Image: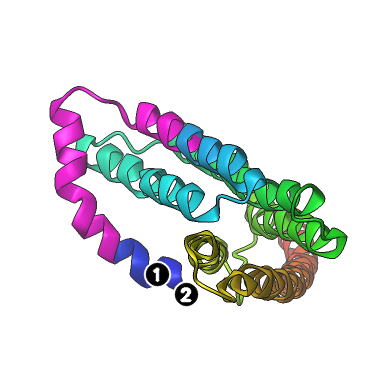
Amino acid sequence: MLNKYARAFFTRVLTPFAAFLIRRGVSPDTVTFIGTAGVVAGALVFYPRGEFFWGTVVITLFVFSDLVDGNMARQLGRSSRWGAFLDSTLDRVADGAIFGGFALWYAGSGDDNILCAVSIFCLASGQVVSYTKARGEAIGLPVAVNGLVERAERLVISLVAAGFAGLHKFGVPGIDVLLPVALWIVAVGSLVTLVQRVVTVRREAEEADQEAASETPQESETAS
């Protein structure tokens, strides 16, 4: 849902910056790599230490590279299968680092095994949600459903909550409860989305198989 509206808005906002990078000779792939490295560093350096505010600031600065690199490619007329593959692959790396950072915090100083497990579930379910759509499309199905919680929703919910939760270290009382709540929301939402996509793929696969089976006798009659 957020992908549809937020991506269009930020694409317009970031177009001048993308054009600036092009004039400086920066390639879209370079932006992709730098953006992913920044997100991974922000997540794995700050989050395991409980520095959620500063970690979120760093991640937010770099996460928009996901929009900038595609914008640059379109301006250059270089949109390619390789660029799409690289972007999607490194998105999975960045997402894994964010939820992995949460898991490391709760496994260590955060001292909460349940929330550690929830963080790991968010990490795994997010990867599988993306895989179901990619795999369904790879076998020729439209996968005509986005689901309740896509990548944009997962990131917005978790990063906004983490940023505000980090204000606890600045003396804001009780606000650190936002992160556990957000992780539970993402976990449940990801599970619902996974079920939605699996059900959709199964229905589309059965319809495609039935259509193929009904066409086979007609082709045989035509051949005879």
Is residue 146 found left or right of 36 in the rendered image? right
Using the image as rendered, state which of residue 125 and residue 204 is in the foreground.
125
**Residue shown at the point (47%, 61%) measured from the top left:** 170
Residue 89 showing in the rendered view: no
Is residue 125 found inside the magenta-colored segment of the image?
no
Q: CA distance from mark 1 to mark 2?
A: 6 Å
> Which residue is situated farthest in the front direction here?
171
**Residue shown at the point (41%, 51%) measured from the top left:** 57
**Label 1–label 2 contact, CB within 8 A:** yes
**Residue shown at the point (81%, 50%) measured from the top left:** 107
The type of residue carrying mark 2 is: Met
Q: Quadrant of residue 12?
A: bottom left
Using the image as rendered, state which of residue 158 and residue 177 is in the foreground.
177
The image position of residue 173, as x and y in percent, is: 55, 74
Q: Quadrant of residue 151?
A: bottom right
Disc 2 marks which residue? 1
The type of residue carrying mark 1 is: Lys
Provide the residue span drawn in magenta.
9-36
Q: Identify the disc placed on residue 75.
A: none
Q: Is residue 26 above or below residue 56?
A: above
Residue 50 showing in the rendered view: yes
Disc 1 marks which residue? 4
**Residue shown at the point (42%, 37%) measured from the top left:** 35
Please identify the quadrant where the C terminus is shown.
bottom right
Q: Total number of numbered labels?
A: 2
Tag 1's secondary structure? helix
